[in-house]
């Protein structure tokens, strides 16, 4: 393999580029109309720019911009691969470069054009545009070859990186064409029907080695925590335990007395220290932690998550308290009173923490006049990582250069609008007058965590006289996420909190009358999207309730889902295949099976857990997990499997052990001893089958996570008859449910 | 006073205070950044290196303890990523975010050195010291089995 990731960054003035490119939309036209800009972009990439996405060097090297950030999900490979497919590029000659932060060209269509990788939507959102861009460049190459060879365009075909004239046997390599190509002012028009048929794909649907993997087995992969700059200092920041609180006093003299400490910096939200070495910075941090007093400003003071959840639950059950309609089909309010029979149940979920392996950190350098900055950070959102430092420094956005690196995990934590961990480094670097690397300790990462929200779910189901489920009511009382995590997005999306509420309905199932209500709480606790977002809590509630209905009606939970999926062939196929793989009907000594099904933003999945239970200790063990997934066309099938395995392990921790509690507004946990994530000896054997369909590709990065809690809880019910309605299923809760 | 030791076969020295965790000397002093900081408390294994041939959490070792000793980091495991584990890690497409993988590989290398043909259970027991938040465990098992087979 010769392709590689360019670890060096583009090194020309973004300001200049942005001015030249202007405010065009995500369109290839930018490329060609802004040819000068494209040429600038390509100057560092090497070769000639055919568009802001592609340049080709005379030696045949094809450089493709990657607009997605890489946190382990594989988009840095998948997106360029999609473009390379339609370009008919020789993949071994492809080099991938992270795109510069120019929203107008590289922004994610699914997030209003900001450069932001989240929601497992990179492939889904960029699929069609990137195919078109690739096809357009291929067309330009063919047009130039036709001219050169003096043959009609329709006599030419392509093989990887070569234009072929079969009649005469003449061949022109892409690199050769690039050396003489005339690039038109207007991009050639490519209609969707001119794109390749899936049967002609050479790259999509075939597995290639992810481009950044070689550096991940020899220690050379660069994360922001690995960045070192000449003259760099080390920083630590002790944040107020509560959002909105500010530093009052701390043992400043003691901190300054530590050898290597350069200075302390009072920030609006915490206390920073800058030192010559990381050990001096951490020693200073320790003294600050032990001596700091904070103002009582901020909302969360006094908040207790156990009591808070009880209050949430009371609100959920209290039908006199109105919510806002989040999702509605049919007419629940008219139909529920007519139901022949009804059932109800309450489900609860705790706060949960991302626990990405690389604690948050960033490196920043600020100009002496404070009018320009450069940052190095692992961010899911290069746009916000540029915007937030600019705001903090009071300078224009284009005065901040962002170098976004590989991330040691993201899971939703690394893209808040305020880019908290990036701003730390910028403010300390400004004050110190030297570049600064700010590293959070694991304890900082937990204490400053932004969590999957606390939520309570009151569900009601109504049945017709034949026992058929026809009415579904879900009252979701949850701690707000989007208004805290990204207020701009919240306003732009019509004040809807999709991160909290997604998955509360019964997508995929045929239930004619559904109402999902959102009842908002604002505890002041810091929140964020977390892998699986609203689906985690919502599908725990809905898939458990479906199972409860089946058991109450005395029917097989598989049979009930079969009925509910009767009009959904994709979903039906998934549950049937999963059941077959798990040998659903077979009884097993000391073990039991539980099933869950999800339609997660168009990706459908079925999961079956095989569990055992130590009734004395209350400990659950998952032994096997079968999962079928239909994500439409799988761009990288083995990566679909890998992401599904990954999501299952993530979901396992959230189902069994991961729990953040808040006392007097502050986080109680600190590190992996009191926030336990799954280890190798706790994970089941996973059996994943990707069910291929011709549907357009949908997401895979997190979709299986929400299957796990309901599948395990349903298995416990199958084994014991006891129902687990509060996630995670800690041993104490399991014992209580069994009692 | 400087502390002298060997890293990846080369002489190294640091004037960091004696209680400084070896991890920070390796990463920020010697600029061998393949060894990672994950928890600082010996719970996650991202900082795993070999000291005199056996695995150790470098965040839990004070630099004074390694005077005269030999440290191997991921950068020194092989010259060109040719260790059977590194090859197996690519063959099984193990890494996702990759941040823990240096530690995973160093931990697995320690296992294979002591026990060239481990059973699945032995692999799982040995490797449960190392957290992978991306949940690549199943592939790690496969990669260790492959390396044991192909070594």
Image: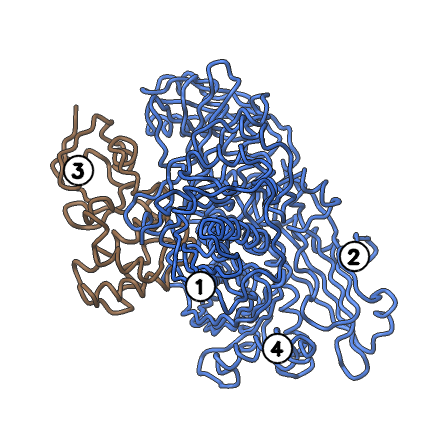
The mark lying in front, picked from 1 and 2, is 1
Label 2: which secondary element: loop
Q: Circle 2 is placed at which residue position?
A: A318
Say above or below: A534 vs A297.
Answer: below
The x and y percentages for residue A448 are 52, 38
- Report the Cα–Cα distance between label 4 and label 2: 36 Å
Q: Earlier in the sequence, mark 1 or mark 4?
A: 1
- Give the position of the C terminus of chain A as an image quadrant: bottom right
Judge the density around disc 1: few (<14), some (14-19), many (≥20) Cα neighbours within 10 Å: some
Q: Colour of chain A?
A: blue
Label 4: which secondary element: helix
* Residue A73 shows in the view: no
Q: Which mark is residue B66?
A: 3
The mark lying in front, picked from 4 and 2, is 4
Disc 3 and disc 1 on one polypeptide chain: no
Q: Nearer the viewer, residue B142 or A657?
A: B142
């Amino acid at each position: 393999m010769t392709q590689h990731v360019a670890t060096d960054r583009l090194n020309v003035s973004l300001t200049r580029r942005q001015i030249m490119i202007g405010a065009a939309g995500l369109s290839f036209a930018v490329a060609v109309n802004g040819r000068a800009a494209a040429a600038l972009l390509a100057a560092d990439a090497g070769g000639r720019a055919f568009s802001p996405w592609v340049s080709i060097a005379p030696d045949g090297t094809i450089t493709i911009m990657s607009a997605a950030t890489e946190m382990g999900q594989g988009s840095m490979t998948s997106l360029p691969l999609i473009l390379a497919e339609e370009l008919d590029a020789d993949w071994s000659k492809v080099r991938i470069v992270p795109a510069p932060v120019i929203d107008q060209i590289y922004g994610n269509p699914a997030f209003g054009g900001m450069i932001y990788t989240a929601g497992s939507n990179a492939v889904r959102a960029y699929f069609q545009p990137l195919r078109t861009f690739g096809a357009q460049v291929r067309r330009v190459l063919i047009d130039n070859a036709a001219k050169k060879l003096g043959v009609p365009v329709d006599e030419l075909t392509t093989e990887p990186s070569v234009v072929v004239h079969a009649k005469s046997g003449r061949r022109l390599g892409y690199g050769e064409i690039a050396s003489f190509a005339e690039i038109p002012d207007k991009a050639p028009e490519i209609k969707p029907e001119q794109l390749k048929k899936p049967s002609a794909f050479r790259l999509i649907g075939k597995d290639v080695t992810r481009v950044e993997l070689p550096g991940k087995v020899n220690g050379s992969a660069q994360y922001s925590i690995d960045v070192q700059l000449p003259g760099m200092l080390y920083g630590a920041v002790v944040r107020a335990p509560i959002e909105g609180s500010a530093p009052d006093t701390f043992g400043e003299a003691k901190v300054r007395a530590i050898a290597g400490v350069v200075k302390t910096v009072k920030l609006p939200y915490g206390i920073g220290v800058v030192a010559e070495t990381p050990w001096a910075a951490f020693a200073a941090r320790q003294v600050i932690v032990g001596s700091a007093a904070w103002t009582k400003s901020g909302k969360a003071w006094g908040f207790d998550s156990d009591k808070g959840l009880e209050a949430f639950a009371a609100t959920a059950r209290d039908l006199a308290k109105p919510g806002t309609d989040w999702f509605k089909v049919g007419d629940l309010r008219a139909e529920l009173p007519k139901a022949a029979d009804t059932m109800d149940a309450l489900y609860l979920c705790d706060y949960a923490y991302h626990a990405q392996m690389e604690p948050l950190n960033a490196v920043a350098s600020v100009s002496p006049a404070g009018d320009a900055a450069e940052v190095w950070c692992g961010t899911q959102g290069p746009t916000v990582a540029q915007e937030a430092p600019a705001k903090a420094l009071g300078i224009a956005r284009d005065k901040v250069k962002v170098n976004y690196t590989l991330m040691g995990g993201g899971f939703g934590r690394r893209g808040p609008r305020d880019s908290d961990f990036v701003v730390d480094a910028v403010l300390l670097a400004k004050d110190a007058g030297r570049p600064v690397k700010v590293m959070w300790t694991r304890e900082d990462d937990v204490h400053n965590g932004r969590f999957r929200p606390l939520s309570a779910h009151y569900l009601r189901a109504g049945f017709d006289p034949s026992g058929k489920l026809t009415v579904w009511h879900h009252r979701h009382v949850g701690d707000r996420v989007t208004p805290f995590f990204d207020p701009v997005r919240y306003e732009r999306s019509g004040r809807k909190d999709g991160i909290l509420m997604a998955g509360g309905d019964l997508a995929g199932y045929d239930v004619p009358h559904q109402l999902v209500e959102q009842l908002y709480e604002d505890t002041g606790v810091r929140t964020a999207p977390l892998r699986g977002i609203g689906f985690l809590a919502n599908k725990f509630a809905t898939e458990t309730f479906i199972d409860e209905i089946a058991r109450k009606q005395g029917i097989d939970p598989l049979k009930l889902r079969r009925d509910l999926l009767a009009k959904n062939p994709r979903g039906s196929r998934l549950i049937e295949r999963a059941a077959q793989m798990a040998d659903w009907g077979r009884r097993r000594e000391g073990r039991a099976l539980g099933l869950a099904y999800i339609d997660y933003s168009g990706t459908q999945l079925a999961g079956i857990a095989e569990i055992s239970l130590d009734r004395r200790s209350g400990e659950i063990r998952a032994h096997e997990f079968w999962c079928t997934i239909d994500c439409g066309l799988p761009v990288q099938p083995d990566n679909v499997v890998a992401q599904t395995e990954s999501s299952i392990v993530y979901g396992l921790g959230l189902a069994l052990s991961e729990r953040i509690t808040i006392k007097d507004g502050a986080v109680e946990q600190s590190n992996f001893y009191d926030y336990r994530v799954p280890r190798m000896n706790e994970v089941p054997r996973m059996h994943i089958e990707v069910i291929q369909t011709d549907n357009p590709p949908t997401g895979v990065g997190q979709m299986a996570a929400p299957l796990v809690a309901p599948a395990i809880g349903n298995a416990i019910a199958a084994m014991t008859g006891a129902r687990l309605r509060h996630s995670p299923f800690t041993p104490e809760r399991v014992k209580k449910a069994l009692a | 006073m400087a502390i002298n030791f060997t890293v990846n076969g080369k002489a190294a020295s640091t004037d960091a205070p004696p209680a400084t965790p070896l991890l920070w000397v390796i990463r920020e002093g010697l600029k061998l950044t393949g060894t990672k900081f994950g928890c600082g408390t010996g719970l996650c294994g991202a900082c795993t290196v070999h000291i005199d041939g056996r695995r150790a959490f470098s965040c839990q070792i004070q630099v004074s303890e390694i005077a005269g000793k030999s440290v191997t980091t991921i950068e020194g495991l092989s010259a060109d990523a040719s260790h059977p584990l590194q090859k197996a890690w690519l063959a099984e497409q193990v890494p996702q975010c990759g941040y823990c993988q240096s530690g995973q590989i160093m931990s697995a290398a320690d296992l294979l050195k002591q026990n060239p043909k481990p059973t699945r259970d032995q692999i799982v027991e040995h490797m449960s010291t190392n957290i992978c938040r991306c949940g690549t465990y199943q592939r790690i098992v496969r990669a260790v089995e492959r390396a044991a087979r192909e070594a």
